[in-house]
Image (spheres, rainbow, N blue to C red):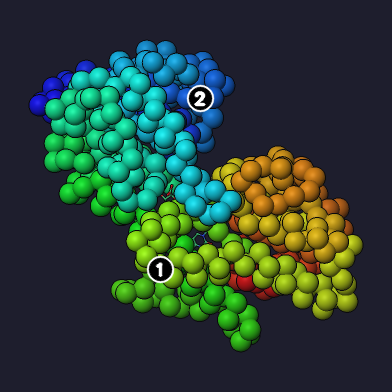
Amino acid sequence: MVKNDITKLITDKGARIGVIGLGYVGLPLLVEFARNGFESIGFEVDEWKASEINDGRSYIGDVPESTVRELAEAGKLRATIEFEHLKNCDAIIICVPTPLRKTKEPDVSYILAAAEEIKNNLRRGQLIVLESTTYPGTTDEVLLPMFEETGLKLDTDFLLAFSPERVDPGNPQFQTHNIPKVVGGCTDASTEVAAHLYSQIVANVHSVSSARVAEAAKLLENTFRAVNIGMANEMARLCYTLGIDTWEVISAAATKPFGFMPFYPGPGIGGHCIPLDPHYLSWKARQHGFDSRFIGLAEEVNSRMPDHVVQLISDGLNDAEKSLKASRVLLLGVAYKRDINDVRESPALSIIDRLRAKGARVSYHDPFVSEVRFDDAHTESTGDPLQSIALTDEELRASDCIVIVTDHSGINYHRVTELAPLIVDTRNALNGELRRESRARIIRL
Ligand code: SAJ
């Protein structure tokens, strides 16, 4: 049984760790193993990323450059585009993207490409763990048969598990080492050894009975968020109709010390997880004739929020006897959430699209995002690229409407309320005092 051999290598910190995919999940994970004394090798298809790491630089905000440099210089951390080095790894962790196709169906092509590389280099004595968020059954229905085509056998020759990533980009409180880790193997031995591996870098490892349970747990986590955010967004639209302040309603409900968890309305949901992951679950459900209606409904409500934001802008301009057409609309923030530079699936892109379609003159200011391109596969949007403009007094005065789409903490909102004539605040970025003292008219989501 290969279990004892791998366990001993891990215990002695002699196991060489391979991580495939060095993005916001893979790089922090690789660094964590290296920091804990393991020889760690990152595998990338992007040569630029590999050379950045080998030169001691970090392109992920949550990973300090000094840490990468230190570990690279100590020979504990390196990256390569040559996947044949996988054969030297005792544990291989897959952290590649799982996007959606245009049809909203799962795209597991990155997982399959990584699995193919592993299959070509598979040997006795390896543990493989999939971390990419995917539908229940991927690990045992897709990966296991691929690996056993080599003639090597699960448990006898290799181990296979799933462990969902839970990275929350930009979250200063929770980073890889202190986020509990769920682990589920295709066999008990796989679960046990995978749990032993993660216990080297994470304080709290939670083992479950199968890879499917671990895959499903991750999808529940993110579907839970999408559905509850959808509820908050629907509440916002209802409160707007009833003339009730949504944020006051939510903060009042949040005083309940049990049985309630606040979610907040926004301009829509962005990122590479919450808008996408629930569709992996609904796709698998449909394969079994099961209609998971909450997921579809949440998507419908959340994806309509950009329209609602444009309606608020139009209503505000109309009250000032201005039309959207030819009005100067300045977006504050285009990243999908506060204090990060990621615009993937950002609702700001849809808002810009819609405003442009109505003839508004759109610009944006985002200290984290210097340029937004609309030809990216991740966006449905079209049109010329935009560059972030300086937030000068002139720009604020000259704008007909300022739209707070991302509530970055470094913006001087007091100045915005002093100089802008109209503000649409989709993030409750303007606290009570700013709203009371504001010279601008403020419309809140
Ligand atoms: N959002 C709202 N209202 C809310 C919360 C979020 O509109 O009450 C929006 C955000 O502005 C953002 C989107 O939803 O556009 C997603 O927000 P998020 O906080 O879930 O951020 P992500 O997608 O970067 O990270 C999430 C993780 N975040 C949290 O748990 C807080 C977590 O769900 C996953 O670990 C991660 O996705 C992932 O990789 O799956």
Identify which residue is drawn at 63% across, 84% down. 241
**Location of mark 1 (residue):** 291
Report the side of 170 relative to 290 (left or right).
right
Residue type pointed to by label 1: Asp
**Location of mark 2 (residue):** 45
Indicate which label's residue lies in the foreground, 1 or 2.
1
Q: Where is residue 67 in the image (x, y as percent from the top left)?
A: 43, 24
Image quadrant holding the C terminus, namely: bottom right
Q: In the image, is residue 105 above or below residue 198?
A: below
Q: Position of residue 88 (x, y in %)?
A: 30, 15
- Tell me the SS state at disc 1: loop
Residue type pointed to by label 2: Val
Q: In the image, is residue 132 above or below residue 317?
A: above
Report the side of 324 relative to 247 (left or right).
right
Report the side of 244 relative to 93 (left or right).
right
Quadrant in which residue 342 is drawn: top right
Q: Where is residue 21 in the image (x, y as percent from the top left)?
A: 44, 31
Identify which residue is drawn at 31% across, 17% down. 87
Visible residue check, residue 46: yes
> Among all residues in the image, which is located at the extreme bottom?
242
Circle 2 Cα neighbour tier, 10 Å, few/some/many (<14 / 14–19 / ≥20): some
- Tell me the SS state at disc 2: loop
Identify which residue is drawn at 19% across, 29% down. 153
